[in-house]
Amino acid sequence: METFLNTIISFPTAIYTTLLGIVICYWLFALIGMMDIDILDTDAEIEADGDVEGLSGISGLMVTLGLTGVPITIIVSFLVLWGWLITYFTSLFLIQLLPFNWLKWIVGTGIIVVSCGLSIILTARCIRPIKPFFKSNYEKITLVGRECTVSTSKVTEKFGQAICDLGSTELILNIRHKEPNTIKKGDKVTILEHNQDENTYLVGDLDINN
């Protein structure tokens, strides 16, 4: 027990131990109904296999890494859990054997970088089987007729995405529009039709910013 405690409060495991404590507290609050599982979820329906050209910021990065399709709270929980496990066992079997403190800090920093990369890969694999369970919840929502904001640099017959605000959450949808058009990022469009085979949405102009 002493070895366990010393490891989880030592660098670099201590960083993930703190994050894991926050995650555990969150799920305890969610379990008793004091917090919503979707509290941080703003991109619940980014298509993992969709185009990322023109998609900026965190949304584009998450698509590239495959961290999409489930509430972001679940993604963060897996990232933290895997990061903690990796740093804990590497600290237990490697860092504690190093003779100098300065060497432990150098190796510990490297372990943090490696654990971040590995936790992303492992999380992407873990969430893949559970994506259909969350996707079905959003398929029940009628989106035709709703207003969306374009989030990509352009919208064509083969590419485009927009953010649809549902109040409690925001969906990032794959949208399509006939060409030629002058639609750009920030413009408002209306959803006209849903293509279930491709899971894309045909949109029409609402207003075009000059």
Image (cartoon, rainbow, N blue to C red):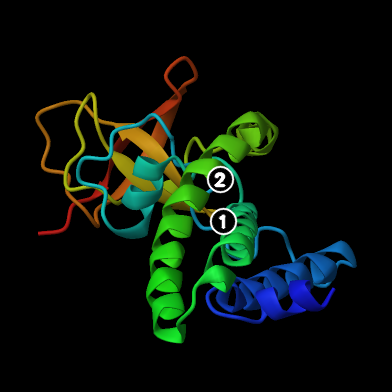
Disc 2 from disc 1: Cα separation:
6 Å
The percent position of residue 53, horizontal first and vertical second, equals 21, 40
Residue denoted by label 2: 123
In the displayed structure, does residue 42 sit left or right of residue 172?
Answer: right
The disc labelled 2 sits on which kind of residue?
Answer: Thr
Residue at 27 percent of width and 37 percent of height: 160
Give 91 or 190, whichever is nearer the viewer: 91
Q: Residues within 10 Å of mark 2 (few under 14, many from 20)?
A: many
The disc labelled 1 sits on which kind of residue?
Answer: Leu
Q: Name above or below for residue 18 compared with residue 173.
A: below
Extreme bottom residue here? 101
Contact between marks 2 and 1 (CB within 8 A): the answer is: yes
Extreme right residue here? 32
Give 3 or 119, whichever is nearer the viewer: 3
The percent position of residue 16, horizontal first and vertical second, equals 59, 71
Which quadrant is the N terminus positioned in?
bottom right
Q: Which of marks 1 and 2 precedes in the sequence?
A: 1
The percent position of residue 74, horizontal first and vertical second, equals 64, 53
As helix, strand or loop, the secondary structure at mark 1 comes to: helix
Which quadrant is the C terminus positioned in?
bottom left
The percent position of residue 87, horizontal first and vertical second, equals 57, 63
Q: Name above or below for residue 148 compared with residue 210.
A: above
In the displayed structure, does residue 201 sit left or right of residue 43?
Answer: left
Question: Residue 25 is drawn in which quadrant?
Answer: bottom right
In the displayed structure, does residue 160 sit left or right of residue 26?
Answer: left
Q: Which mark is residue 49?
A: none
Residue denoted by label 1: 79
As helix, strand or loop, the secondary structure at mark 2 comes to: helix
Q: Is residue 149 visible?
A: no
